[in-house]
Image: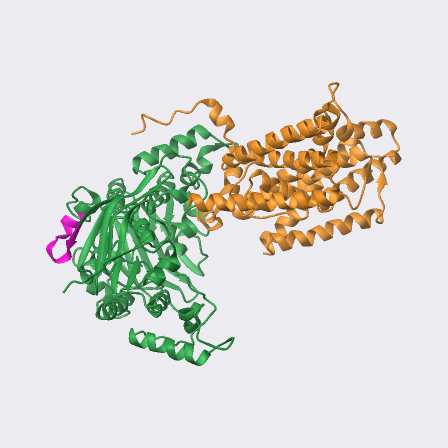
Amino acid sequence: MAEELFRMEGITKTFPGVKALDNVSFSVNKGEVHGLVGENGAGKSTLMKVMSGVYQADEGKIFIEGQEVKINSISKAHELGVAIIFQELNLLPHMTVADNIFVGRQPKVGPFINDKKMHTDAKKILDDLGIKISTHATLGTLSVAQQQMVEIAKAISMNSKILVLDEPSAALTDKEIAQLFDIIRTLQKKGVGMVYISHRMEELAEICERVTVIRDGQYIGTRNYKDITMDELVNMIVGRSLEDKYPKHKRKIGEIVLEAKNIKRGDKVNVDHIYVRAGEILGIAGLMGSGRTEIARCLFGADKADHKEMFIDGKPVTINSVGQAIAHRIGYATEDRKYDGLALDLDVNYNTNMAHLKQLSRFGIIDDKKATENADKYKKLLRTKTPSLKQIVRNLSGGNQQKIVLSKWLCNDVRILIVDEPTRGIDVGAKFEVYELFNRLSDQGVAIIMISSELPEILGMSDRVLVVHEGTINGELDAKKTTQEEILFLAAGYNKLEKKAQ
Amino acid sequence: MSETTEKKPKLAYILRFGPSTRKAIFSGIALILLFIVFSVMKPTFISSGNLINVAQQVVTYAILGYGLTFCLVCGGTDLSAGASMALSGILVTTLLIKGFPIWVCILLALAFGIMMGIINGFTIEVLGVVPFIATLGTQWVFRGLANVLVEGKPIYTNTIPNKGIQEAFYMIGGGRLPNGVPYSVIITVVYGIILAFLLAKTRIGRQIYACGSNLEAAKLSGINAVGTRMFAYCVSGFSAAIAGIIVTSRISSAQPMAGQGLELEAIAAAVIGGVSNSGGQGAIVNTIIGALIMGVLRNGLNLLGVSSFWQQIVVGIILVGVIALDVRRNKKAK
């Protein structure tokens, strides 16, 4: 019954100085969703790039339906029916959905594009996949999830038999993920084989039949998802056993450190009351775009609030600029480290010390020795893997980049740390380290406000949970007693629970 | 935890001019090759007389280039530098002719340079005009002002009433040490070292890199981005004023049309030396090497009898070629 569609054998790929893949084998059956997991930098992307013709393997063989093939370019891969949906979508935002699906292959009448046929064909493909998007819509106006669906439709229109989905759910809400899964199941029925790369174990459990693990460029093993426990899988991924995804910890919660009342900013933020205590982790849940980040930016002084009253240790304070927030020892690790967290083309030293320049300088002159020592101290403290402090941050993996963002604030001796999606796009091992770090910080009395879309993370790490809906706080929950369902209920705007006064 | 702090020899600290010194090595090798080629093809190239010629040409590229490096590294550009240079030259000469003491005239001209930087910074940071357009506009304003002040005609330093001042002023750009090294070269080197230090070793320097590499991240790290970028434009204005004074002194006249297009050559010099035109990367050492390449190239081609039209073509191809190579290298690195 399991008819093999695609197989790679003994794939080895070497880059100058690194063996990115070492004798890796991998196969996909007809109608199968095959999970591919591994830490960042394990070689998943390289393997998929070999599969889709971006890179050529140094050694190894590739078979499609039993025939040996050479995939030496992306167009060759398309010809053979292999398509990859990258994390960053390759679409044309100013053109219509139909144009995007058929770009370069539009049906023609003489030299002209047959618009009518193109839209009919596009509609047929979308309908087949159960995607409800108008073919006339301008792509840029669609949500990320919808754009992704268009990208999938485009791949299908090219008669792809094998589809690689590289972290397709990274930017999607739970509801959108469910829609994506519907599409994936439709494709399965059509016999399309899929490779599904993700860091989210819950998703893999739901959608994948088999899962293959690679670590440090080596093939670790392929298992049936049904026959493997989460612990075994995590063990395969990180190469050591993790007792639990979230380190157990007893917190000593102290006095209220930061308190804010009546925060208002346009129609985006309208928060009556929010506070966080020393040694506490306050989880902030909510759908994307619900105003979680906007609240954080107001607290941090990055956006000017129309109105807000802030108190630190019970004393009223003014925080209208990032500088003032830093002076009050508040730190903010942003949601998107590449966009506004790191200077990617500068080195580890420059990035670590970016918010710490005042303390490092006398009469405006930087003490280079102190700067190096500081960067080195936090590199070691957070176990950041980098060849040197002069390494350009762009070249580091997501987990290590995130550690540098955190270093930037830790070296300022923060008392209040706001972290926005602290583990997005980082691997299991690095996640665990970040959680351990948060626990250590809370031991030291640091108050942490943690915004996250990953509900297990919110439940696993927080003491209290605030659920944000349309810029307001729609409920406060005790993380030990609540459930994912309860959080989702509040995040969706329902509010049948009593709001606690304090 | 930190018992094995990275031990670095002191020299490494001093030589570390900031990010992207690696590119300086590539352009440095290119410069040496160029030097060897011209020396072999035209032995007069390495005569001391000619080298001084080259040096004087390099001075203007380098000093304007320094200022532009600050602007480029912090993610901007300054197209008004050439016009600022002309205007400062006119200003200093006018003041000297009016009979003010020489140091007063120079200080006023330099202060005016900073003022022009503030005007650029204000246009960009407060009015919110993108650097390219803002400084294109101020370029015309400054150039126009220079023309208005002297009614479009050059003014000559031999009309300075005091002969002593006339000679003293000439020494800045035209004077030499007994061994033949022009004072202007010494000014360029000393000023270059100061700026290199400023960019690589100071707080404002690191802020400039941060703003140029990722403005949002810099702001969210508590860096005063407006002040930082304003400072970069002031360095550019100040540098243009120094260049204006030196050139005026050397040619004994202030020309309202001096330095036309020179800002573009200075940008080219900086970029050829390895300063990134999209911000966050580059150091003064890159600019110096770039200015030397431009100067050596122009002079060498002149000696070989290549017409200035062909020179333009060569410089254009080299500029594009350098960037194309760089793009390739970056792609490979990814």
Q: Residue at x 14, y 65 (%)?
A: A1
Query: Residue at the location (39% across, 43% down)?
Result: A395
A241 vs A18, left or right, is left
Asked if A117 appears above or below A374 in the picture, the reply is: below
Q: Which chain is orange?
A: B
Up the image or down, A472 lies above or below B313; here it is below
Residue situated in front as seen by the camera: A480 or B97: B97
**Residue A126 in picture, x, y percent from top left:** 33, 74
Question: In the image as oriented, which residue stretches furthest toward the top?
Answer: B178
Left or right: B166 with respect to B327?
A: right
Front residue (pair A310, A402)? A402
Q: Chain A appears what colour?
A: green
Query: How many numbered marks have been drawn onto this rendered protein structure?
Result: 0
Q: Is residue B306 left or right of residue A69?
A: right
Q: Is residue B187 visible?
A: no
- Which residue appears at 54% of the width and 39% of the height? B282
Asked whether A241 falls inside the magenta stretch, the response is no
Check the image and name the residue furthest to the left: A227
Which one is nearer the viewer's eye here, A459 or A301? A459
Return the x and y of residue A221 as percentages of the image width and height.
Answer: 18, 48
Q: Is residue A229 magenta?
A: yes
Residue A474: % across, % down: 28, 65
> Could you say which quadrant of the image residue B60 lies in?
top right
Judged left or right of residue B326, residue A49 is: left
Q: Say which quadrant the N terminus of chain B sits in.
A: top left
**Above/below status of A38 relative to A493:** above
x and y, in percent, of residue B85 in the image: 72, 42
Q: Residue at x 68, y 48 (%)?
A: B80
Q: Report the span colored magenta.
A: A222-234
